């Protein structure tokens, strides 16, 4: 695996040993900060706050001056491990088992953070270069994403940072390292449909008004017909009903209301406003006069795409040289903090294989963490050539 790979793996293990479940940091960012300071980076630690939300640790580190300026974005927070009894190893032990690093956050995304940090340290050790490298690291990617990357970007901009491109270390690959780069993400909109009726005895239905049939009609109308047929870079938008509840434990009572919750992953044919309007129109038509409310959660996850350019070609070429495959350009999957970064510069996502992220026994081959570090180093060398 080589010295670079060994260094990336050991840093990944050190980060995994910090149980940084959102919103706690537990020393993860300080461990990364110490490593970057040793590599010559200027590191700033900043905590962002907002009423009603937890305080969040963030890190901004930079080295070099002027353009071109390449940023790396990532997060050190992780999702909870769940039932620890189901894990074969301590989820925060960072053990190597059968050549794989096991632990919560190895894939999503401490392995990616460690790989880029090791690559940047190796690149900077070779001497001065024309341009700048920055790290944008948050502890709020797995949480509400209020006191994280969005505010960190504004913090960096206020200090004069102007990014030319950004690489996000999310686990982008589907099956094998190098099979996919994310060039965009679908938007995400959450909604709640409530249909109101009148509670009563099932034996006297004329004295009641059952809301369930109307709720079922509306739920069907939200799904069919499809919202769209897809766009140039995106598959069709998709609405999923995630719960259907009436809160009724009795067999002889008609409930007073029925509630359906749903999520829409939408492409760039829609904005949150136009999508909300379409769903409201469908609800109006299908409700058949039933009383209802349709409420949407605040949406900060808009669909976006980074049009392929010379930077995309550079990253694809670096991947192909190391793993022998040219990655697909994709917009699949969930949301990421790239949705905030795209307002500042073109952004791509490339990291480890995502098959075990958020799972019990989350893990990644040590050799792949090392290979990812080598790819990142190739990207840095080509970018600043």
Image: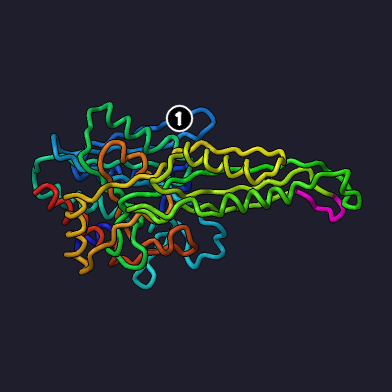
Q: Nearer the viewer, residue 352 or 366?
A: 352
Residue 316 spot, x, y in % from top left: 21, 58
Q: How many marks?
A: 1
Question: Quick check: can you spot residue 277?
Answer: yes
Element class at badge 1: loop
Question: Quick check: can you spot residue 110?
Answer: no
Residue 115 spot, x, y in % from top left: 27, 55
Q: Is residue 286 magenta?
A: no
Q: Is residue 250 magenta?
A: yes
Residue stretch rendered in magenta on the structure: 247-253
Q: Nearer the viewer, residue 332 or 290?
A: 290
Residue sitting at the far bottom: 98
Vertical comparison of 272 with 79: above or below: above
Residue 100: image quadrant is bottom left
Q: Nearer the viewer, residue 61 or 272?
A: 272
Q: Residue at x 54, y 31 (%)?
A: 52
Residue 175 spot, x, y in % from top left: 36, 67
Q: Nearer the viewer, residue 274 or 63?
A: 274
């Amino acid at each position: 695996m080589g010295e670079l790979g060994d260094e990336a793996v050991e840093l990944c293990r050190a980060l995994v040993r910090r149980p940084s479940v959102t919103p706690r940091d537990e020393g993860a960012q300080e461990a990364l900060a110490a490593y970057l300071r040793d590599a010559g980076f200027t590191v700033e630690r900043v905590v962002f706050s907002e009423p009603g939300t937890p305080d969040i640790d963030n890190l901004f580190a930079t080295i070099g001056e002027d353009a071109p300026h390449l940023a790396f974005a990532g997060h050190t927070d992780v999702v909870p491990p769940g039932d620890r009894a189901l894990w074969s190893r301590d989820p925060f032990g960072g053990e190597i088992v059968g050549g794989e690093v096991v632990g919560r956050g190895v894939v999503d995304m401490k392995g990616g953070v460690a790989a880029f940090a090791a690559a940047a340290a190796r690149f900077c050790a070779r001497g001065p270069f024309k341009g700048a490298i920055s790290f944008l690291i948050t502890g709020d990617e797995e949480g509400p994403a209020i006191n994280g990357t969005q505010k960190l970007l504004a913090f960096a901009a206020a200090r004069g940072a102007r990014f030319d491109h950004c690489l996000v270390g999310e686990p982008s690959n589907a099956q094998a390292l190098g099979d996919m780069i994310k060039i965009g993400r679908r938007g995400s909109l959450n909604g709640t449909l409530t249909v109101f009726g009148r509670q009563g005895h099932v034996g006297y239905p004329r004295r009641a008004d059952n809301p369930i049939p109307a709720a079922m009609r509306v739920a069907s109308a939200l799904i069919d017909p499809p919202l769209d047929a897809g766009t140039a870079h995106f598959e069709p938008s998709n609405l999923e009903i995630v719960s259907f509840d009436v809160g009724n434990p009795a067999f002889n009572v008609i409930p007073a209301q029925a509630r359906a919750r749903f999520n829409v992953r939408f492409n760039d044919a829609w904005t949150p406003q136009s999508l909300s309007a379409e769903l409201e129109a469908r609800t109006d038509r299908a409700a058949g006069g039933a009383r209802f409310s349709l409420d949407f959660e605040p949406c900060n996850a808009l669909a976006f795409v980074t049009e392929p350019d010379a930077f995309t070609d550079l990253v694809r070429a670096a991947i192909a040289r190391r793993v022998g495959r040219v990655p697909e350009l994709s917009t699949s999957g969930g949301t990421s903090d790239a949705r905030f970064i795209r307002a500042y510069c073109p952004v791509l996502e490339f990291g480890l294989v995502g098959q075990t992220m958020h799972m019990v026994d989350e893990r990644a081959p040590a050799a792949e963490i090392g290979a990812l570090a080598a790819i990142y180093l190739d990207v840095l060398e080509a970018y600043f050539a």
